[in-house]
Amino acid sequence: MIYLIPSIIVILLNSFIYKKYYAKNYYKKAVLFFGSSIFVFISSLRYKTGTDWTAYYDFFNKITNDNYYSFYFEPLFKVFSILIKNINSNFNFYLFCISINFVFLILIIDKILSMTNMYYNKSILFLSVYLYTFSYYMGGIRQQISFFFSTVSLFYLLKNKKILSLIFFIIGFLFHYSAILFLVNYIIYHYTSDKKNTFLTISFKKGVLILIIFFILIYGIFETPIFTLSFGNSNLIKKYIISYRGNSSINSILNYSLRNFILIFERVIILIIIFLVRKNYTCNKISKFFFIMYIFGSIFYIFFMFIARNIAGRGILYFRYADIFFFSTLSEPIAKTFFNKNSIKHQNLSKFISTLILLYLLIRFYVTILVANKIFYYPYKNIVF
C-alpha cells in the first residue's frame, strides 16, 4: 500500500494538526509540499514499475544528439531527455527530474483554487490531483510534463496574462501533442460571463448548438469515410489515434468494464449535484469557468468512451481542473443548501461530506487505478530495496 502513503499523511496532518495552525499560510503549503515530496521519491526511485517503464528506459539509454530524429517522441521531450542525460545518465535521476514537478503542480493548483474565493478542502485537493495524475507520473511521463505546463498556462490565463499563458501552452504542446485539447479551455474562458448569475456571454441555445456541431464533426471524422480515408471496415485516423495510446499493451490486457462504469457514473452524479447547487458557483468568472469546463469535460469523456477509449482517457486530463475544483469545494455548497452557513449543523454536515468525499477518492484510487492496473504497479520495486 505504499502508493496510499502520501494521501494518508496529508489527510492525517490536516485532520489532527491543521486547526492549531489554520491561520498560518506557510503551514498549509508545508503539508502539501511534504505529501507531494513523498510521491516524488516513490515515482523517481521505481525500478521496472509503471505502465511505460521499459519503453522510456530504452528510449533514455538510446537517445543521443546523433539519433535525435530516429525517435517519434515530441521535440521538446527529446531535447529535455538529451539535456538530462548529458548531466547524469542515470535513469532514476531522469525520473526524479520529471517527478519533481508534482510538488509545484500541487502548489500551483492550490493557488488557482484560491483565486475562486471559495472555501476548499486541501486534503481533497491533494488526493484528487494525486488520483488524476498518478498514472502519468508512473508511466505516461510525456503527457504528465505537458499537463504541468498546461497548468501553468491555465494559471496565467486566469490572471489574464494571455501571452505568458500561450507560451506555456506551446511548451506543453511540444512535450505531448495531446495538449492541443487544452485550447478548448481558452474558448470556454472567453465565453464565460463576468456578470453575476450568468454563466455564458452567449445564449444557452447557441452554446448547445456549438457543442452539437463540434461533436457531430468529431463523430464524422471517426466514423464516416466521407471525412477521411478508410482502411478495411475502420477509419484510418481512428485506427492511428487509438493505437497512439498503446492499445495493445494496455487495454487489451486489462478489463476496464467495471472501471469505465464507475468513471461514467461518477461524472453523471457530480453533474446532477453541481446543477442543484449551481447558484453557489456564480460568485465569480473563475468558478463559472470551472462549472462550464466540467460540463464540457463530461460530455467529451462519455462521448469518446464509446468510440475511442484512449482519447477519452488522455483528453479528459486537460479538463480535470474542474473535477479537482468541485471535489474540493462541494461540501460547503451542499451543506449551505440545508442549513445556515454560520450554524453548527452546517459545519458538521460540511465536515461529514468532506469525509465522505475523501473516503470515496481513496476507494476510487485503489479500485480504478491500483487494482485495475495491478500488473503494472505491483509489486512495487525500487533501486533502494
Image (cartoon, grey):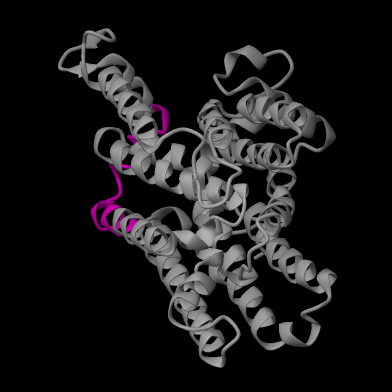
Say which residue appears at 37% left-offset and 46% top-offset.
298
Q: Quadrant of residue 67?
A: top right
Say which residue appears at 51% left-offset and 60% top-offset.
326
Q: Position of residue 64 (x, y in %)?
A: 71, 21
**Of 189 and 137, which appears nearest the observer?**
189
From where the camera sits, is residue 52 visible?
no
Whether 231 is drawn above or below 360: the answer is: above
From where the camera sits, is residue 236 visible?
yes
The residue stretch that appears in magenta = 244-263
Q: Quadrant of the C terminus?
A: bottom right
**Of 326 and 57, which appears nearest the observer?**
326
Mostly what secondary structure, the magenta segment?
Answer: loop
Q: Is residue 168 left or right of residue 57?
A: right
Q: Is residue 13 left or right of residue 53?
A: right
Whether 196 is drawn above or below 122: the answer is: above
Q: Position of residue 85 (x, y in %)?
A: 76, 32
Say which residue appears at 73% left-offset and 24% top-offset.
79
